[in-house]
Amino acid sequence: MKNEHCYELTKTILATSICSDEVSQSVSKFRVHVSLPKPFQLGGLAGFPFTGITGFNAFAGHIPDDGFAIIVYGPHIGISGSDQPGKVLRSGQLLETSCCGALLGILNQFTTEGSNMPDQDLDYQQWTLTHQLDEIQQSVSTMDEPLINMTDLMFIQINKRIKKLIDKTKGQFKGKKVALIGGVIINTDTGLPDWFDEREFSVHTF
C-alpha cells in the first residue's frame, strides 16, 4: 500500500481526544502500529480536548526527531442491540447503560424543567460541555433524535477546538507532520464491533 504522506510508523506517535469511557478506547487499537504502545491522552468527557494548550505543547515535545504525529478525536454514541441510541450492553452487566453518559446528562438537563447547571468547580468538564452545546438548548425538545444531533454538534465543537489548539501550538510542532483524524465513535454491545464515522482527515506540516 502506498504511503501517500510518507509517514514512518517507527517515528510516529498517537494522541487521542476521546471520551474517558472505557468503551471508547477501541478507536485507538491501531496504536500497535506506531512507535509507542499507549496514546497521549488529550481528551476528557465526550472527547473534548480538556488538556488545552499545555497538553498540545507536551504532546508535540514527545514526537521523535524528524517524526510524525496522529491525533484521533471525536465524541461517541452507543447503539445497543435494541437499536436504542445512547445505550450499550457492557461486559459483566445484564442491563444496558448510557453511552455517552455526559451527553445524555446534558440532554436530560436541557429537557427537565428547573434543572441546575453542573457545578463549575466540582464538575468542571460537564459544565464546559454544557456551555459548548447551549446553542441548541431551546430547540432540543423538537428534534427527532436529540442525542444524535447533540453528538453531531459535539463533533463540530471538538473539531474547531482541536484546530484552534493546533494553530496556537504550531511552533512546537515545527518540522513535524501532524495528521488529524476526526469522527464519531459508534459503540455497540460487548462482543460486537465498534465503528468510526470519519468526518475529518487532514495532514499538516508547520
Image: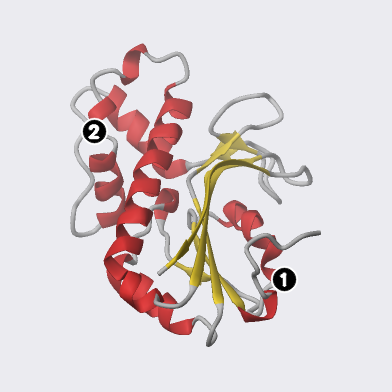
**Which percent across, then down, holds residue 94?**
69, 40
Bin the neighbour count of mark 1 within 10 Å (Cα to Cα): few under 14, some 14-19, many 20 and up.
Answer: few
* Residue 157 to residue 23: above or below: above
The front one of 48 and 101 is: 48
Marker disc for residue 66: none
The residue positioned 53% from the left and 70% from the top of the image is: 69
Q: Which of 69 and 133 is in front in this view?
A: 69
Q: Where in the figure is residue 127, as x and y percent of width and height? A: 24, 48
Q: Quadrant of residue 12?
A: bottom right
Mark 2 surroundings: few (<14), some (14-19) or many (≥20) residues within 10 A: few
Q: Residue at x 66, y 79 (%)?
A: 35
Total numbered labels: 2
Rendering quarter of residue 155: top left
Q: State whether residue 135 appears in this view.
A: yes
CA gap between label 2 and label 1 equals: 38 Å
Labels 2, 1: front one: 1
Can you tell which mark lies on residue 134?
2
Q: Which of 34 and 95 is in front in this view?
A: 34
Location of the C terminus by quadrant is bottom left
Point out residue 162 in the picture as x, y percentages from the top left corner: 37, 55
* Residue 107, position as x, y percentages in the image: 36, 30
Which circle's residue, 2 or 1, is located before the other in the chain? Answer: 1
Q: Which mark is residue 32?
A: 1
Q: Residue at x 71, y 29 (%)?
A: 81
Name the residue type under label 1.
Val
Amino acid on which the number 2 mark rests in the picture: Asp
Q: In which quarter of the image is the N terminus?
A: bottom right
Q: Are marks 2 and 1 in contact (CB under 8 Å)?
A: no
SS class, disc 2: helix
The kind of secondary structure element at disc 1 is helix
Residue closer to the observer: 196 or 78: 196
